[in-house]
Every structure is written in structure tokens, then in C-alpha cells.
Amino acid sequence: MTRPSIYGLTFAELQDWFTNRGYKSFRAQQVWDWLYRKRVTSFQDMTNIKKELIDLLEENFVFETLELHSKQESEDGTKKFLFKLQDGNLIETVLMKFDYGNSVCVTTQVGCNIGCSFCASGLLSKDRDLSGGEIVEQIMKVQLDMDRQEKEERVSHIVVMGIGEPFDNYANLMTFLRVVNSDRGLAIGARHITVSTSGIVDKIYRFAEEQLQVNLAVSLHAPNNHLRTDIMKINRSQPIEKVMDAVDYYLEKTNRRITFEYILLDGVNDRPQEAYELIELLKERKKLTYVNLIPYNPVDEYIQYQQSTKGSILTFFEILMENGIQCGVRHEQGSDIDAACGQLRSKQMKKDREKAKN
């Protein structure tokens, strides 16, 4: 990428960019209006900005870094977008429709190095981090897709749970959050944004200091170190006790509820004994914790894992609730398409490799 994305600047950074070149800072608001409210798709469409500034913007920034490669749409309204980046890499973005609004799941890295043994995202190791602009543009592409349907709909919620570990791309993640949350632009409320981490301990401490109202979710998936290490290799360097110490700091610092994500794997971590271990782990923190129980989306490459039975899921849920642990079972979205995160990308890359061989 020879020039950075215009979407990769926070409002304050764009103000500084203009003033450092001798222009008035109000130009930043003009540009942001065109970007995030009028949602134009080229600098030339910014009709109230003089030509010399348009030329300057075009010389220094690119408007588009993502190209739509393919799109899948589920019967329930879920849409999965496969985007091609300027360097040829592929990423996924997902739009999910709920009663409360339209939620977009964004990707933060090309590939993932966390190595969870059940996750399609980890089938391909990390190639690079996404820039802040590439993350923001995922939201814009989805919003523009909705705009073309000629409906008064908007992206109202964001989950940073796509391919990659968000806290492993911390600086660009924070740029993204500040851009989409700014009331001068998309104005997506901080409490409608959730960032998920596999448990990068030092970044949990750092995130607690950001003074944001953004929600935090921690991918736990097991109540003890032995089991968690088996399914999440990151537990070797970030064991549960260190993760929970960081969580305690976060809870004390922010007084905000934290969500623990728990993918239920048949016969692996979904038995009553794991439920009671999880209760023991969370009992001193239960006032500010919520457990999101997630039915597993099977991945072809991981035949050792299967989705838990409805009976096992219900039993696990009831044990937690009866012992004062607030929890819920995530509703499956897009079950009739490549639902698991990273599946569409990995399948397309497999096709590309096979085509190249022939």
C-alpha cells in the first residue's frame, strides 16, 4: 500500500493533517461529513471542498483498500463478505441481523497466530496486521451495501471477533474504535461495541486504562489450565490465573461487566464437572460477569470436535444459572452458509491453490 487509507485517521489526526499544511481545522469536519454521513465513494464527490484540497487528498490517501471478492447470504439475513486487500490477501466480515439492530463482526488481522485448536481462523497463520483504515473500511463496505438496498438501515453494533487477535494489533484497533465511535461520524455507541480477546494479559491491563465504555469479552472456553492448554495454546504463556488477575484489575478499574465466551465442544468441555469448575472460577466475580455459551460451528479440518447436544447445552446453562452465574446461549447465525469464522476465507484460498496447481 503506497498511500494510507483516508479511513485510517481519527478526527483529531485529520484536523492536525490539515492545520500542519496551513489549512483551517474545519476542513476535517467537512471531509468526515462526506466520509461517514453522506458516505461518498471518491474524493471527487466532495463537492463543497475546493479542487486544490481534493487533489491534495488524492495525492496522500486512497479511498478504497477493500474489493468485494464474494458474498454469501443466509436465509436468516446474515451476510458474509469476503474482501480482497490491495496486497491480494483475503479477509472476512459478517453482518448479522437481530431484533435490536444490525451487528457487524470485523477482522483485525490477515490470519491468526493464537492457534485455538477448534477455530477456522487459525488454519492459516498470521500474515500481517490490518491497518486502522482497513478495519474501518469493513464497516463502510457493509453500510454501503445496506444503503444500496434503499432502506433506512445502519450498522448499529460492532463485534471485534473476526479473524485475528484484536489485542495483538492494539494501536490499529484503538484507531478503529475512536473512528467508529466518534459522534462526528458514524456515532456507533461505545456500549454497542464489543472487543474480544483470547486473553492477552498486558493488553487487558492497558485496555482498562483507556477510559472507554466499549465492552470487553474474554475467550475462556475451559475452566482449568490443563483443558484450556489442550484447546488454546496461548494458555501456555497466558494461563488462567494471570488472565483472571487482569480481569480483576479491569473490573476494579472500570466497574463494567465483562463477558466470558465459552464454546461448547461435545464431550470435551461441556460436562457438568466443567460447569462446576467454571462456577468456582467465577463465583467471586459473578456480579460483573456474564458467560456467553456458544454452540460450536464444526470445521472440516477439526474432525475431533463436534457440537454439543442440545441436552448438554441446556444442562450446562441450568447449572450455571442455578449457581448465580448469569449466562445465555448464543443464537446461531448463518448456519446455512460458511458460518464459522475464517471458513469462507480458508475454502477460497484452498480453491486458489488447487487452481494454481492445475
Image (cartoon, helix red, strand yellow):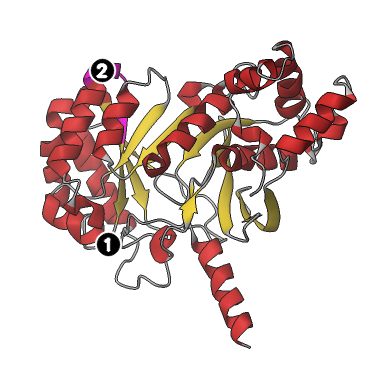
The label shown at residue 121 is: none
Observer-nearest of 22 and 237: 22
Q: Position of residue 77 (x, y in %)?
A: 63, 47
Amino acid identity at mark 2? Lys
Residue at 75%, 16% (x, y): give it: 27
Residue behind mark 1: 266
Amino acid identity at mark 1? Asp
Magenta residues, as a range?
Answer: 252-259
Q: Mark 2: which secondary structure?
A: helix
Observer-nearest of 184 and 289: 184
Q: Name, please, the residue furthest toward the bottom.
A: 358
As for residue 254 lying within the magenta part, the answer is yes
Residue at 24%, 57% (x, y): give it: 233
Quarter holding residue 290: top left
Q: Mark 1: which secondary structure?
A: loop
Q: Position of residue 56 (x, y in %)?
A: 78, 30
Residue at 60%, 34% (x, y): give it: 8
Q: Position of residue 158 (x, y in %)?
A: 52, 34
Q: Residues within 10 Å of mark 2 (few under 14, many from 20)?
A: few
Relative vertical location of residue 233 with respect to residue 284 in this rendering, above or below: below
Q: Residues within 10 Å of mark 1 (few under 14, many from 20)?
A: some
Q: Earlier in the sequence, mark 1 or mark 2?
A: 2
Residue behind mark 2: 253
Which of discs 1 and 2 lies nearer the camera? The answer is 2
* Left or right: 174 in relation to 236: right
Q: Position of residue 256 (x, y in %)?
A: 32, 20
Relative vertical location of residue 310 with respect to residue 63 in this rendering, above or below: below
As for residue 278 lying within the magenta part, the answer is no
Residue at 52%, 46% (x, y): give it: 130
